[in-house]
Image (tube, rainbow, N blue to C red):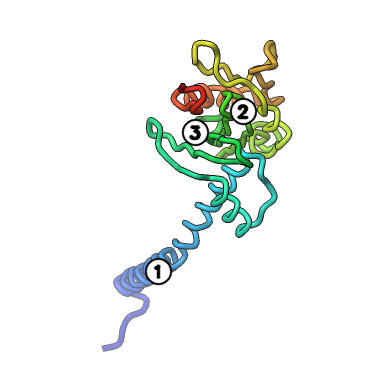
């Protein structure tokens, strides 16, 4: 019996078989590439942590080696990832950060010295305006403004802030020009994510 290739039944069956084959191939490719994708994601996280420790410009192997050298322990504090690090004999705690910007999620890592001041900072974003809100990720100069700032006040509360007008240079960083809402998101993220994370010297 000759198939009627112009019939609706033939077209539907042919399309269904084609969809199944394509779906199978995509699933196979996804599973084959997943270990590589997971490894790339893990490496990116390690690089971001190193960025917060003011260690930049390393390739993949160099970053893996440096991370293994300086990061001594990873733990959870109130559901938040923190990393105990040693930089040339100095104890530094790196806290993971997550919040909301203007157009999507923002994140980052803040490295904290034992005296409660900022050792270094790195911020990232899912989707912010290029040249404005995206500067929280793209501007190393802006990230470096956090270095040396006080994080905690006398009462233990987080005083590190991102503001439009700096009144206290010891604990405040001026916001990204033209990106007030994203900067507000960074400020809120710092307040929320650092309230339960303190270096050992601060806990004593």
Distance in Å between CA atoms under marks 2 and 3:
17 Å
Residue 173, numbered circle: none
Instruction: Please report contact status of discs 3 and 1: CB closer than 8 Å, yes or no.
Output: no
Instruction: Please report contact status of discs 2 and 3: CB closer than 8 Å, yes or no.
Output: no
Distance in Å between CA atoms under marks 3 and 1:
33 Å
Q: Is residue 30 above or below residue 168?
A: below
Determine the residue positioned at 64% across, 18% down.
Answer: 171
Task: Identify the residue position indicated by label 3 in the image.
Answer: 98
Q: Please state the horizontal and vertical placement of residue 203, each as a whole percent of the image.
A: 46, 23
- Nearer to the camera, 11 or 143: 143
Task: Identify the residue position indicated by label 2 in the image.
Answer: 118
Q: Is residue 172 above or below residue 50?
A: above
Label whose residue precedes the other's in the sequence (2 or 3) = 3
Label whose residue precedes the other's in the sequence (3 or 1) = 1
Q: Is residue 91 above or below residue 183?
A: below
Q: Secondary structure at mark 2?
A: strand
Write down the quadrant of residue 113 in the picture. Answer: top right
Write down the quadrant of residue 76 in the picture. Answer: top left
Task: Identify the residue position indicated by label 1 in the image.
Answer: 28
Image quarter where the N terminus lies is bottom left
Residue most extreme to the left: 1
Q: Please state the horizontal and vertical placement of residue 198, each as a whole percent of the image.
A: 49, 26
Query: Foreground mark, 3 or 1?
Result: 3
Query: Foreground mark, 2 or 3?
Result: 2
Distance in Å between CA atoms under marks 2 and 1:
45 Å
Determine the residue positioned at 47% across, 37% down.
Answer: 82
Determine the residue positioned at 71% across, 25% down.
Answer: 177
Instruction: Please report contact status of discs 2 and 1: CB closer than 8 Å, yes or no.
Output: no
Label whose residue precedes the other's in the sequence (2 or 1) = 1
Left or right, residue 190 beside residue 120: left
Q: Secondary structure at mark 3?
A: strand
- Crowding around mark 3 (Cα neighbors within 10 Å: few <14, some 14 to 19, many 20+) is many
């Amino acid at each position: 019996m000759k198939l009627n290739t112009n019939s609706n039944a033939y077209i539907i069956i042919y399309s269904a078989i084609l969809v199944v084959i394509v779906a199978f191939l995509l699933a196979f490719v996804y599973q084959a590439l997943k270990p590589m994708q997971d490894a790339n994601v893990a490496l990116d996280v390690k690089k971001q942590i190193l960025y917060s420790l003011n260690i930049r410009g390393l390739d993949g192997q160099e970053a893996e080696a440096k991370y293994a050298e300086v990061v001594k322990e990873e733990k959870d504090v109130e559901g938040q990832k923190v990393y105990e690090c040693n930089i040339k004999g100095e104890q530094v705690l790196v806290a993971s950060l997550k919040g909301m910007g203007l157009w999507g999620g923002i994140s980052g890592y803040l490295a904290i010295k034992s005296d409660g001041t900022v050792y270094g900072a790195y911020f990232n974003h899912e989707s912010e305006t290029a040249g404005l809100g995206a500067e929280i990720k793209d501007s190393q100069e802006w990230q470096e403004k956090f270095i040396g700032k006080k994080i905690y006040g006398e009462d233990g509360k987080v005083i590190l802030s991102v503001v439009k007008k700096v009144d206290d240079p010891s604990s405040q960083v001026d916001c990204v020009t033209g990106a007030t809402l994203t900067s507000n998101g960074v400020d809120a993220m710092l307040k929320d994510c650092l309230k339960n994370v303190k270096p050992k010297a601060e806990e004593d």
